[in-house]
Amino acid sequence: QAATPAVAAKRPNIVVILVDDAALMDFGAFGGEARTPNIDRLARSGAMFTSYRTSPLCSPSRSMLLTGVDNHRAGVATIEEILPPSQKGKHGYNLHFEPGVLTIADRLKANGYRTLMAGKWHLGHGEGDLPNGHGFDRSLALDASGADNWQPKPYMPYYTEAPWFEDGKPAKLPKNFYSSDLLVDRLKGYIDEKPAGAQPFFAYLAFQAVHIPVQAPKEVSDRYQGRFDAGWAAVRAARNERAKALGLIPADAPTVGMPDFARDWNKLTPEEKAIYARAMEVYSGMLESMDASIGRLMQHLQARGELDNTLFVVTSDNGPEFSDPVHAPGMDIWMALHGYAWKLKGQGEKGSLNFIGRDWAAALAAPSRLFKFYTTEGGLRVPLILSGPGVAPGQRIAAPAFVTDITPTLVDFAGATAGPAGVSLDGRSLKPVLTGQAKTVRGADEPVGIEVSGNAALFRGHLKLTRVMPPLGDGQWRLFDLETDPAETKDLAKDRPELFQAMLKDYEAYEARVGVAKLPPGYTTQQQLMSNALDRQKGSIAVLAGGALVLVLGGVGFLIWRRRKARA
Ligand SMILES: O=[N+]([O-])c1ccc(OS(=O)(=O)O)cc1
Protein backbone atom coordinates (compact mmCIF):
# COMPACT_ATOMS: atom_id res chain seq x y z
CA GLN A 1 0.00 0.00 0.00
CA ALA A 2 2.61 2.56 -1.10
CA ALA A 3 1.19 6.03 -0.70
CA THR A 4 -0.19 7.79 -3.74
CA PRO A 5 0.55 11.54 -3.72
CA ALA A 6 -3.11 12.24 -2.87
CA VAL A 7 -2.96 9.97 0.20
CA ALA A 8 0.41 11.29 1.28
CA ALA A 9 -0.90 14.84 1.25
CA LYS A 10 -3.64 13.88 3.70
CA ARG A 11 -2.34 13.70 7.24
CA PRO A 12 -2.44 10.13 8.46
CA ASN A 13 -4.18 8.85 11.55
CA ILE A 14 -1.64 7.32 13.89
CA VAL A 15 -2.14 4.29 16.14
CA VAL A 16 0.67 3.36 18.52
CA ILE A 17 0.16 -0.14 19.93
CA LEU A 18 2.37 -0.88 22.91
CA VAL A 19 2.43 -4.48 24.09
CA ASP A 20 3.58 -4.87 27.69
CA ASP A 21 6.66 -7.06 28.20
CA ALA A 22 6.54 -8.76 24.78
CA ALA A 23 9.78 -10.49 23.80
CA LEU A 24 11.55 -9.95 20.46
CA MET A 25 10.13 -13.20 19.08
CA ASP A 26 6.63 -13.18 20.61
CA PHE A 27 4.73 -12.05 17.49
CA GLY A 28 4.17 -14.59 14.72
CA ALA A 29 6.05 -12.50 12.16
CA PHE A 30 9.06 -12.51 14.51
CA GLY A 31 8.91 -16.27 15.08
CA GLY A 32 6.53 -16.61 18.05
CA GLU A 33 4.37 -19.61 18.95
CA ALA A 34 1.15 -17.63 19.37
CA ARG A 35 -1.11 -16.86 16.43
CA THR A 36 -1.02 -13.10 15.79
CA PRO A 37 -2.38 -12.74 12.23
CA ASN A 38 -3.27 -9.07 12.54
CA ILE A 39 0.12 -7.97 13.83
CA ASP A 40 1.69 -10.18 11.15
CA ARG A 41 -0.39 -8.45 8.50
CA LEU A 42 0.89 -5.07 9.70
CA ALA A 43 4.44 -6.45 9.62
CA ARG A 44 4.03 -7.70 6.03
CA SER A 45 2.39 -4.51 4.82
CA GLY A 46 5.07 -2.34 6.42
CA ALA A 47 8.51 -2.40 7.96
CA MET A 48 9.92 -4.78 10.56
CA PHE A 49 12.83 -3.30 12.51
CA THR A 50 15.14 -6.07 13.66
CA SER A 51 17.65 -3.95 15.62
CA TYR A 52 15.27 -1.84 17.66
CA ARG A 53 16.10 -1.21 21.31
CA THR A 54 14.20 0.21 24.22
CA SER A 55 14.96 0.53 27.92
CA PRO A 56 14.81 -2.53 30.17
CA LEU A 57 11.83 -1.25 32.16
CA CYS A 58 8.27 -0.10 31.73
CA SER A 59 7.90 3.56 32.74
CA PRO A 60 11.31 4.73 31.45
CA SER A 61 10.54 3.12 28.07
CA ARG A 62 7.07 4.64 27.98
CA SER A 63 8.41 8.08 28.84
CA MET A 64 10.94 7.87 26.00
CA LEU A 65 8.46 6.42 23.51
CA LEU A 66 5.94 9.19 24.18
CA THR A 67 8.39 12.11 24.24
CA GLY A 68 11.50 11.26 22.19
CA VAL A 69 13.50 12.39 25.23
CA ASP A 70 15.89 10.29 27.38
CA ASN A 71 14.13 8.88 30.47
CA HIS A 72 16.18 10.89 32.99
CA ARG A 73 15.68 14.14 31.11
CA ALA A 74 11.99 13.35 30.70
CA GLY A 75 11.63 12.83 34.48
CA VAL A 76 11.04 9.08 34.53
CA ALA A 77 14.47 7.60 35.23
CA THR A 78 13.05 4.37 36.65
CA ILE A 79 9.83 2.87 38.05
CA GLU A 80 8.59 3.98 41.44
CA GLU A 81 8.37 0.34 42.50
CA ILE A 82 12.19 0.13 42.68
CA LEU A 83 13.08 3.74 43.55
CA PRO A 84 15.37 3.89 46.60
CA PRO A 85 14.47 6.61 49.14
CA SER A 86 17.83 8.34 48.48
CA GLN A 87 16.87 9.07 44.84
CA LYS A 88 13.47 10.52 45.70
CA GLY A 89 13.00 14.10 44.58
CA LYS A 90 16.18 14.23 42.46
CA HIS A 91 15.71 15.78 39.02
CA GLY A 92 14.68 13.01 36.66
CA TYR A 93 13.51 10.85 39.54
CA ASN A 94 10.15 12.44 40.27
CA LEU A 95 8.70 9.78 37.96
CA HIS A 96 6.38 12.07 36.10
CA PHE A 97 7.12 14.31 33.12
CA GLU A 98 9.20 17.37 33.99
CA PRO A 99 7.94 20.79 32.85
CA GLY A 100 8.76 21.49 29.21
CA VAL A 101 8.76 17.81 28.24
CA LEU A 102 6.16 17.42 25.49
CA THR A 103 4.47 14.16 24.61
CA ILE A 104 3.66 13.12 21.08
CA ALA A 105 0.03 13.80 22.05
CA ASP A 106 0.94 17.40 23.01
CA ARG A 107 2.71 17.83 19.69
CA LEU A 108 0.01 16.28 17.51
CA LYS A 109 -2.77 18.11 19.37
CA ALA A 110 -0.99 21.41 18.69
CA ASN A 111 -1.13 20.38 15.02
CA GLY A 112 -4.85 19.73 14.89
CA TYR A 113 -4.98 16.05 15.80
CA ARG A 114 -7.53 14.45 18.13
CA THR A 115 -5.54 12.59 20.76
CA LEU A 116 -6.86 9.41 22.37
CA MET A 117 -5.51 6.77 24.67
CA ALA A 118 -6.60 3.51 26.30
CA GLY A 119 -4.46 1.34 28.55
CA LYS A 120 -1.56 1.38 30.95
CA TRP A 121 -0.08 4.77 31.78
CA HIS A 122 2.37 4.28 34.73
CA LEU A 123 3.83 7.76 34.26
CA GLY A 124 2.86 9.60 37.42
CA HIS A 125 -0.29 10.22 39.39
CA GLY A 126 -0.14 13.70 40.87
CA GLU A 127 -2.36 16.58 39.78
CA GLY A 128 -1.88 17.01 36.03
CA ASP A 129 0.27 13.90 35.66
CA LEU A 130 -2.35 11.65 34.05
CA PRO A 131 -2.85 11.54 30.24
CA ASN A 132 -5.34 14.44 30.24
CA GLY A 133 -2.50 16.60 31.60
CA HIS A 134 -0.21 15.50 28.77
CA GLY A 135 -2.11 16.25 25.62
CA PHE A 136 -4.72 13.50 25.50
CA ASP A 137 -8.29 14.66 24.69
CA ARG A 138 -9.79 11.35 25.82
CA SER A 139 -8.18 8.65 27.93
CA LEU A 140 -8.93 5.52 29.88
CA ALA A 141 -5.74 5.01 31.85
CA LEU A 142 -4.43 2.49 34.36
CA ASP A 143 -2.17 4.38 36.74
CA ALA A 144 -0.13 1.34 37.87
CA SER A 145 2.29 -1.21 36.48
CA GLY A 146 -0.57 -3.60 35.93
CA ALA A 147 -3.90 -4.88 37.16
CA ASP A 148 -6.19 -7.84 36.90
CA ASN A 149 -7.42 -8.41 33.34
CA TRP A 150 -10.89 -9.60 34.29
CA GLN A 151 -12.10 -7.17 36.92
CA PRO A 152 -11.13 -3.81 38.42
CA LYS A 153 -8.80 -5.35 41.00
CA PRO A 154 -5.09 -5.04 41.79
CA TYR A 155 -2.72 -7.89 41.08
CA MET A 156 0.06 -8.13 43.58
CA PRO A 157 1.34 -7.03 46.94
CA TYR A 158 2.48 -3.73 45.52
CA TYR A 159 -1.01 -2.43 44.92
CA THR A 160 -4.07 -2.11 47.11
CA GLU A 161 -6.34 -1.03 44.26
CA ALA A 162 -6.53 -0.93 40.46
CA PRO A 163 -6.34 2.83 39.79
CA TRP A 164 -8.27 3.33 36.55
CA PHE A 165 -8.95 6.90 35.39
CA GLU A 166 -11.02 8.32 32.56
CA ASP A 167 -9.99 11.81 31.47
CA GLY A 168 -8.20 12.22 34.80
CA LYS A 169 -11.13 11.23 37.01
CA PRO A 170 -11.69 7.85 38.70
CA ALA A 171 -13.18 5.61 36.01
CA LYS A 172 -16.24 3.44 36.36
CA LEU A 173 -15.35 0.09 34.84
CA PRO A 174 -17.74 -2.78 34.27
CA LYS A 175 -17.61 -5.49 36.97
CA ASN A 176 -16.49 -8.03 34.39
CA PHE A 177 -14.40 -7.47 31.28
CA TYR A 178 -11.35 -8.72 29.49
CA SER A 179 -8.65 -6.07 29.40
CA SER A 180 -7.72 -6.22 25.69
CA ASP A 181 -11.39 -6.07 24.66
CA LEU A 182 -12.18 -3.31 27.13
CA LEU A 183 -9.33 -1.12 25.89
CA VAL A 184 -10.13 -1.55 22.20
CA ASP A 185 -13.86 -1.04 22.77
CA ARG A 186 -13.19 2.18 24.66
CA LEU A 187 -10.80 3.39 21.97
CA LYS A 188 -13.33 2.63 19.22
CA GLY A 189 -15.85 4.69 21.17
CA TYR A 190 -13.45 7.64 21.38
CA ILE A 191 -12.68 7.37 17.66
CA ASP A 192 -16.40 7.35 16.83
CA GLU A 193 -16.97 10.63 18.65
CA LYS A 194 -16.05 12.36 15.36
CA PRO A 195 -17.10 11.41 11.83
CA ALA A 196 -14.48 9.73 9.68
CA GLY A 197 -12.11 12.13 7.96
CA ALA A 198 -13.23 15.16 9.98
CA GLN A 199 -9.95 15.42 11.87
CA PRO A 200 -6.94 13.09 11.96
CA PHE A 201 -6.52 11.22 15.24
CA PHE A 202 -3.64 9.87 17.25
CA ALA A 203 -4.40 6.83 19.41
CA TYR A 204 -2.11 5.30 22.01
CA LEU A 205 -3.24 1.76 22.77
CA ALA A 206 -1.19 0.43 25.68
CA PHE A 207 -2.28 -3.12 26.33
CA GLN A 208 -2.01 -4.90 29.67
CA ALA A 209 -1.10 -8.00 27.66
CA VAL A 210 1.29 -9.76 28.37
CA HIS A 211 2.20 -8.30 31.77
CA ILE A 212 1.50 -10.23 34.97
CA PRO A 213 -1.08 -11.41 35.84
CA VAL A 214 -0.99 -13.51 32.67
CA GLN A 215 -4.67 -14.15 31.99
CA ALA A 216 -6.70 -15.04 28.89
CA PRO A 217 -10.04 -16.54 27.89
CA LYS A 218 -9.90 -20.30 28.49
CA GLU A 219 -11.00 -21.24 24.98
CA VAL A 220 -8.14 -19.26 23.46
CA SER A 221 -5.53 -20.65 25.87
CA ASP A 222 -6.86 -24.14 25.12
CA ARG A 223 -5.72 -23.77 21.49
CA TYR A 224 -2.16 -24.12 22.78
CA GLN A 225 -2.73 -27.30 24.78
CA GLY A 226 0.41 -29.39 24.82
CA ARG A 227 2.42 -26.77 22.91
CA PHE A 228 4.80 -26.14 25.82
CA ASP A 229 4.98 -29.60 27.39
CA ALA A 230 8.62 -30.06 26.33
CA GLY A 231 9.67 -27.23 28.66
CA TRP A 232 11.66 -24.03 28.51
CA ALA A 233 14.96 -25.32 27.14
CA ALA A 234 13.17 -26.78 24.11
CA VAL A 235 11.31 -23.53 23.47
CA ARG A 236 14.50 -21.51 23.75
CA ALA A 237 16.36 -23.84 21.38
CA ALA A 238 13.52 -23.67 18.84
CA ARG A 239 13.41 -19.86 19.05
CA ASN A 240 17.19 -19.70 18.56
CA GLU A 241 16.78 -21.77 15.38
CA ARG A 242 13.90 -19.66 14.11
CA ALA A 243 15.89 -16.48 14.83
CA LYS A 244 18.43 -17.74 12.31
CA ALA A 245 15.84 -18.92 9.80
CA LEU A 246 14.13 -15.53 9.95
CA GLY A 247 17.40 -13.61 9.73
CA LEU A 248 17.02 -11.96 13.13
CA ILE A 249 20.58 -13.13 13.78
CA PRO A 250 23.26 -14.33 11.33
CA ALA A 251 23.18 -18.05 10.51
CA ASP A 252 26.65 -18.48 11.97
CA ALA A 253 26.11 -16.45 15.15
CA PRO A 254 26.81 -18.26 18.42
CA THR A 255 23.64 -19.01 20.37
CA VAL A 256 23.20 -19.80 24.05
CA GLY A 257 20.76 -22.12 25.80
CA MET A 258 19.11 -21.62 29.17
CA PRO A 259 21.04 -19.63 31.82
CA ASP A 260 22.68 -21.39 34.78
CA PHE A 261 19.99 -20.31 37.20
CA ALA A 262 17.24 -22.07 35.25
CA ARG A 263 15.64 -25.14 36.72
CA ASP A 264 15.90 -28.44 34.86
CA TRP A 265 12.44 -29.02 33.39
CA ASN A 266 12.91 -32.77 33.74
CA LYS A 267 13.35 -32.43 37.48
CA LEU A 268 9.98 -30.75 37.98
CA THR A 269 7.15 -32.82 39.42
CA PRO A 270 4.32 -33.69 36.99
CA GLU A 271 2.15 -31.15 38.84
CA GLU A 272 4.78 -28.42 38.42
CA LYS A 273 5.21 -29.26 34.74
CA ALA A 274 1.47 -29.04 34.20
CA ILE A 275 1.10 -25.66 35.90
CA TYR A 276 4.17 -24.12 34.19
CA ALA A 277 3.19 -25.47 30.76
CA ARG A 278 -0.31 -24.07 31.25
CA ALA A 279 1.18 -20.70 32.23
CA MET A 280 2.64 -20.49 28.71
CA GLU A 281 -0.57 -21.71 27.06
CA VAL A 282 -2.31 -18.81 28.76
CA TYR A 283 0.51 -16.44 27.74
CA SER A 284 -0.01 -17.46 24.11
CA GLY A 285 -3.77 -17.12 24.56
CA MET A 286 -3.22 -13.63 25.93
CA LEU A 287 -1.17 -12.69 22.86
CA GLU A 288 -3.74 -14.18 20.49
CA SER A 289 -6.65 -12.45 22.26
CA MET A 290 -4.81 -9.14 22.11
CA ASP A 291 -4.11 -9.66 18.43
CA ALA A 292 -7.79 -10.43 17.80
CA SER A 293 -8.75 -7.15 19.44
CA ILE A 294 -6.20 -5.34 17.23
CA GLY A 295 -7.98 -7.02 14.31
CA ARG A 296 -11.30 -5.64 15.53
CA LEU A 297 -9.81 -2.15 15.69
CA MET A 298 -8.49 -2.53 12.13
CA GLN A 299 -11.89 -3.73 10.90
CA HIS A 300 -13.50 -0.78 12.59
CA LEU A 301 -11.15 1.63 10.84
CA GLN A 302 -11.79 -0.19 7.57
CA ALA A 303 -15.55 0.25 8.04
CA ARG A 304 -14.96 3.96 8.65
CA GLY A 305 -12.87 4.09 5.45
CA GLU A 306 -9.83 5.11 7.48
CA LEU A 307 -7.65 2.01 7.57
CA ASP A 308 -5.56 2.89 4.51
CA ASN A 309 -4.82 6.31 5.93
CA THR A 310 -3.67 5.03 9.32
CA LEU A 311 -0.04 4.65 10.30
CA PHE A 312 0.50 1.84 12.83
CA VAL A 313 3.37 1.38 15.23
CA VAL A 314 3.51 -1.94 17.09
CA THR A 315 6.16 -2.51 19.72
CA SER A 316 6.95 -3.60 23.29
CA ASP A 317 8.21 -1.60 26.27
CA ASN A 318 10.93 -4.07 27.30
CA GLY A 319 11.81 -7.75 27.23
CA PRO A 320 9.82 -10.55 28.88
CA GLU A 321 8.82 -10.38 32.56
CA PHE A 322 10.43 -12.79 35.01
CA SER A 323 8.67 -11.64 38.18
CA ASP A 324 6.85 -14.30 40.18
CA PRO A 325 4.30 -12.48 42.31
CA VAL A 326 2.82 -15.69 43.72
CA HIS A 327 5.82 -16.87 45.70
CA ALA A 328 6.78 -13.49 47.16
CA PRO A 329 6.79 -13.36 50.97
CA GLY A 330 3.32 -12.96 52.46
CA MET A 331 1.62 -13.50 49.12
CA ASP A 332 -0.36 -16.52 50.28
CA ILE A 333 -2.16 -14.36 52.84
CA TRP A 334 -2.68 -11.55 50.33
CA MET A 335 -4.05 -13.96 47.74
CA ALA A 336 -6.45 -15.57 50.20
CA LEU A 337 -7.69 -12.13 51.28
CA HIS A 338 -8.28 -11.06 47.68
CA GLY A 339 -9.80 -14.31 46.49
CA TYR A 340 -6.91 -15.39 44.25
CA ALA A 341 -5.42 -18.80 43.63
CA TRP A 342 -2.39 -20.24 41.85
CA LYS A 343 -3.45 -23.65 40.66
CA LEU A 344 -4.01 -25.54 37.43
CA LYS A 345 -7.77 -25.41 37.59
CA GLY A 346 -8.90 -22.09 36.16
CA GLN A 347 -5.33 -20.92 35.54
CA GLY A 348 -5.46 -17.61 33.66
CA GLU A 349 -9.18 -17.26 34.27
CA LYS A 350 -10.95 -14.90 36.64
CA GLY A 351 -9.68 -15.35 40.21
CA SER A 352 -6.35 -16.78 39.12
CA LEU A 353 -2.98 -15.12 39.57
CA ASN A 354 -0.85 -16.48 36.75
CA PHE A 355 2.73 -15.69 35.77
CA ILE A 356 5.38 -17.31 33.56
CA GLY A 357 8.39 -16.76 35.85
CA ARG A 358 12.06 -16.49 35.14
CA ASP A 359 12.69 -19.80 33.40
CA TRP A 360 10.07 -19.15 30.72
CA ALA A 361 11.11 -15.49 30.50
CA ALA A 362 14.69 -16.61 29.81
CA ALA A 363 13.41 -18.97 27.11
CA LEU A 364 11.21 -16.35 25.45
CA ALA A 365 14.09 -13.87 25.35
CA ALA A 366 15.91 -16.01 22.74
CA PRO A 367 18.15 -15.35 20.91
CA SER A 368 19.14 -12.86 23.62
CA ARG A 369 20.33 -13.26 27.21
CA LEU A 370 18.31 -12.39 30.34
CA PHE A 371 15.10 -10.32 30.20
CA LYS A 372 13.25 -7.26 31.52
CA PHE A 373 15.05 -5.12 34.16
CA TYR A 374 18.46 -6.03 32.61
CA THR A 375 20.44 -4.27 29.88
CA THR A 376 21.43 -7.47 28.14
CA GLU A 377 19.72 -7.80 24.78
CA GLY A 378 16.95 -9.80 26.47
CA GLY A 379 15.84 -6.64 28.25
CA LEU A 380 16.39 -4.18 25.41
CA ARG A 381 15.88 -5.82 22.03
CA VAL A 382 12.18 -6.00 21.21
CA PRO A 383 10.06 -5.99 18.05
CA LEU A 384 9.12 -2.82 16.18
CA ILE A 385 6.69 -2.65 13.26
CA LEU A 386 5.74 0.47 11.31
CA SER A 387 3.03 0.18 8.71
CA GLY A 388 0.81 2.57 6.80
CA PRO A 389 0.79 5.38 4.28
CA GLY A 390 4.30 6.34 3.21
CA VAL A 391 5.86 3.07 4.38
CA ALA A 392 6.67 0.64 1.56
CA PRO A 393 5.52 -2.92 2.30
CA GLY A 394 7.74 -5.89 3.01
CA GLN A 395 10.70 -4.01 4.47
CA ARG A 396 13.15 -5.59 6.89
CA ILE A 397 15.24 -2.87 8.48
CA ALA A 398 18.41 -3.85 10.32
CA ALA A 399 19.55 -0.27 10.97
CA PRO A 400 19.70 0.44 14.71
CA ALA A 401 16.61 2.21 16.05
CA PHE A 402 15.80 3.39 19.57
CA VAL A 403 12.69 4.00 21.59
CA THR A 404 13.36 7.76 21.53
CA ASP A 405 13.13 7.66 17.72
CA ILE A 406 9.39 6.91 17.69
CA THR A 407 8.15 10.40 18.61
CA PRO A 408 10.34 12.27 16.08
CA THR A 409 9.34 9.71 13.42
CA LEU A 410 5.64 10.32 14.06
CA VAL A 411 6.13 14.09 14.17
CA ASP A 412 7.82 13.73 10.79
CA PHE A 413 5.06 11.60 9.23
CA ALA A 414 2.36 13.94 10.57
CA GLY A 415 4.25 17.10 9.56
CA ALA A 416 3.61 18.29 13.11
CA THR A 417 5.92 21.29 13.22
CA ALA A 418 3.57 23.87 14.78
CA GLY A 419 3.33 24.52 18.50
CA PRO A 420 5.95 24.92 21.24
CA ALA A 421 9.32 23.20 20.77
CA GLY A 422 9.61 21.74 24.27
CA VAL A 423 12.89 20.37 25.62
CA SER A 424 15.19 19.09 22.87
CA LEU A 425 14.68 15.56 21.54
CA ASP A 426 17.24 12.79 21.93
CA GLY A 427 15.67 10.59 19.23
CA ARG A 428 15.88 10.87 15.45
CA SER A 429 13.20 10.46 12.83
CA LEU A 430 13.41 7.05 11.15
CA LYS A 431 11.55 8.34 8.11
CA PRO A 432 14.71 8.63 5.95
CA VAL A 433 15.37 4.93 6.58
CA LEU A 434 11.73 3.98 5.99
CA THR A 435 11.61 5.82 2.67
CA GLY A 436 14.96 4.48 1.47
CA GLN A 437 16.68 7.87 1.58
CA ALA A 438 19.21 6.75 4.20
CA LYS A 439 20.66 3.48 5.42
CA THR A 440 20.83 4.64 9.02
CA VAL A 441 19.94 7.76 10.99
CA ARG A 442 23.11 7.87 13.13
CA GLY A 443 26.80 7.88 12.38
CA ALA A 444 28.69 4.68 13.21
CA ASP A 445 30.42 6.36 16.18
CA GLU A 446 27.44 8.25 17.54
CA PRO A 447 26.75 7.04 21.08
CA VAL A 448 23.31 6.25 22.49
CA GLY A 449 23.15 5.60 26.24
CA ILE A 450 20.59 3.73 28.33
CA GLU A 451 20.44 3.56 32.13
CA VAL A 452 17.73 2.30 34.46
CA SER A 453 18.52 1.76 38.16
CA GLY A 454 22.16 0.87 37.55
CA ASN A 455 21.70 -1.43 34.57
CA ALA A 456 23.30 0.40 31.68
CA ALA A 457 24.37 0.22 28.06
CA LEU A 458 26.02 2.40 25.49
CA PHE A 459 25.55 1.71 21.79
CA ARG A 460 27.77 2.83 18.92
CA GLY A 461 26.26 1.29 15.81
CA HIS A 462 26.38 -2.46 16.36
CA LEU A 463 28.90 -2.15 19.21
CA LYS A 464 27.52 -2.30 22.72
CA LEU A 465 29.08 -1.55 26.05
CA THR A 466 27.02 -2.94 28.88
CA ARG A 467 26.87 -3.29 32.64
CA VAL A 468 24.46 -5.74 34.25
CA MET A 469 23.92 -5.37 37.98
CA PRO A 470 23.33 -8.05 40.61
CA PRO A 471 21.54 -10.29 41.36
CA LEU A 472 21.91 -11.68 37.82
CA GLY A 473 24.88 -9.56 36.70
CA ASP A 474 28.21 -8.69 38.31
CA GLY A 475 28.30 -4.94 37.73
CA GLN A 476 31.31 -5.21 35.36
CA TRP A 477 31.46 -3.40 32.04
CA ARG A 478 31.69 -5.58 28.93
CA LEU A 479 31.93 -4.88 25.21
CA PHE A 480 30.11 -6.84 22.53
CA ASP A 481 29.77 -6.71 18.76
CA LEU A 482 26.08 -7.40 18.23
CA GLU A 483 26.45 -7.86 14.50
CA THR A 484 28.39 -11.10 14.90
CA ASP A 485 27.49 -11.89 18.51
CA PRO A 486 23.87 -10.94 19.27
CA ALA A 487 23.79 -13.34 22.25
CA GLU A 488 26.60 -11.38 23.96
CA THR A 489 28.88 -14.37 24.43
CA LYS A 490 32.33 -12.86 23.78
CA ASP A 491 33.50 -9.86 25.80
CA LEU A 492 35.80 -7.75 23.58
CA ALA A 493 36.95 -5.38 26.35
CA LYS A 494 40.47 -6.90 26.51
CA ASP A 495 40.83 -7.34 22.73
CA ARG A 496 39.88 -3.76 21.97
CA PRO A 497 41.01 -1.73 24.99
CA GLU A 498 41.01 1.63 23.20
CA LEU A 499 37.50 1.22 21.95
CA PHE A 500 36.42 -0.03 25.37
CA GLN A 501 37.90 3.06 27.07
CA ALA A 502 36.42 5.41 24.48
CA MET A 503 32.96 3.94 24.93
CA LEU A 504 33.31 4.12 28.72
CA LYS A 505 34.07 7.83 28.29
CA ASP A 506 30.98 8.16 26.09
CA TYR A 507 28.95 6.51 28.79
CA GLU A 508 30.28 8.85 31.49
CA ALA A 509 29.44 11.82 29.27
CA TYR A 510 25.95 10.37 28.79
CA GLU A 511 25.42 10.01 32.56
CA ALA A 512 26.56 13.56 33.18
CA ARG A 513 24.43 14.96 30.34
CA VAL A 514 21.16 13.32 31.36
CA GLY A 515 21.74 13.39 35.14
CA VAL A 516 21.97 9.80 36.35
CA ALA A 517 21.70 9.70 40.15
CA LYS A 518 23.85 7.46 42.38
CA LEU A 519 22.38 4.30 43.84
CA PRO A 520 22.80 3.39 47.53
CA PRO A 521 25.51 0.76 48.20
CA GLY A 522 24.29 -2.81 47.86
CA TYR A 523 21.18 -1.73 45.94
CA THR A 524 19.41 -4.39 43.89
CA THR A 525 16.18 -3.89 41.96
CA GLN A 526 14.59 -7.01 43.40
CA GLN A 527 15.26 -6.16 47.06
CA GLN A 528 14.05 -2.61 46.56
CA LEU A 529 10.88 -3.88 44.91
CA MET A 530 10.07 -6.02 47.95
CA SER A 531 10.97 -3.30 50.42
CA ASN A 532 8.84 -0.69 48.60
CA ALA A 533 5.97 -3.18 48.36
CA LEU A 534 6.10 -3.80 52.12
CA ASP A 535 6.16 -0.04 52.79
CA ARG A 536 3.14 0.41 50.58
CA GLN A 537 1.25 -2.35 52.30
CA LYS A 538 1.97 -0.91 55.76
CA GLY A 539 -1.17 1.17 55.50
CA SER A 540 -3.39 -1.75 54.66
CA ILE A 541 -1.61 -4.01 57.15
CA ALA A 542 -2.34 -1.38 59.82
CA VAL A 543 -6.00 -1.29 58.78
CA LEU A 544 -6.15 -5.09 58.88
CA ALA A 545 -4.41 -5.23 62.26
CA GLY A 546 -6.71 -2.50 63.57
CA GLY A 547 -9.74 -4.41 62.30
CA ALA A 548 -8.50 -7.60 63.92
CA LEU A 549 -7.97 -5.77 67.22
CA VAL A 550 -11.50 -4.35 67.12
CA LEU A 551 -12.86 -7.85 66.48
CA VAL A 552 -10.86 -9.36 69.35
CA LEU A 553 -11.76 -6.58 71.78
CA GLY A 554 -15.39 -6.77 70.68
CA GLY A 555 -15.38 -10.55 71.20
CA VAL A 556 -13.80 -10.25 74.65
CA GLY A 557 -16.28 -7.52 75.58
CA PHE A 558 -19.15 -9.70 74.43
CA LEU A 559 -17.91 -12.65 76.50
CA ILE A 560 -17.57 -10.47 79.63
CA TRP A 561 -21.02 -9.01 79.05
CA ARG A 562 -22.55 -12.52 78.64
CA ARG A 563 -20.87 -13.78 81.81
CA ARG A 564 -22.10 -10.82 83.82
CA LYS A 565 -25.59 -11.30 82.42
CA ALA A 566 -25.51 -15.00 83.31
CA ARG A 567 -24.40 -14.17 86.89
CA ALA A 568 -27.06 -11.53 87.32
O1 LIG B 1 5.81 -5.96 41.87
N1 LIG B 1 6.21 -6.52 40.80
O2 LIG B 1 6.35 -7.76 40.73
C1 LIG B 1 6.50 -5.73 39.68
C2 LIG B 1 6.34 -4.35 39.73
C3 LIG B 1 6.66 -3.62 38.62
C4 LIG B 1 7.14 -4.26 37.51
O3 LIG B 1 7.58 -3.61 36.43
S1 LIG B 1 6.80 -2.78 35.43
O4 LIG B 1 7.80 -2.61 34.41
O5 LIG B 1 5.69 -3.53 34.95
O6 LIG B 1 6.44 -1.56 36.04
C5 LIG B 1 7.30 -5.60 37.47
C6 LIG B 1 6.99 -6.35 38.56
Image: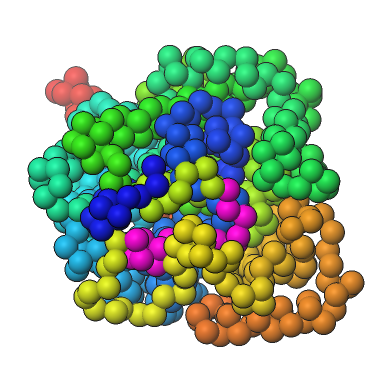
Note whether residue 44 is visible.
yes
| Residue nearest the observer in this picture, 30 or 82 | 30
Residue found at x 74% / y 58%? 483
Quarter of the figure that contains the C terminus = top left
How many callouts does the rendering have? Answer: 0
x, y percent for residue 485: 78, 55
Q: Which residues are magenta?
A: 396-413
Quarter of the figure that contains the N terminus = top left
In the visual, does 553 lie left or right of 313? left
Residue found at x 72% / y 21%? 230
x, y percent for residue 299: 28, 30
Quarter occupied by residue 38: top left
x, y percent for residue 460: 67, 71
Note whether residue 331 is visible.
no
| Residue nearest the observer in this picture, 237 or 326 | 237
Residue found at x 60% / y 50%? 50
Quarter occupied by residue 73: bottom left
Is residue 399 rendered magenta in the image? yes
Q: Main secondary structure of the magenta part?
A: helix
Colouring of the image: rainbow
Residue found at x 71% / y 78%? 503
Q: Up-down: is 526 above or below 500?
A: above
Q: Up-down: is 92 above or below 164?
A: below
Q: Residue furthest front?
A: 5
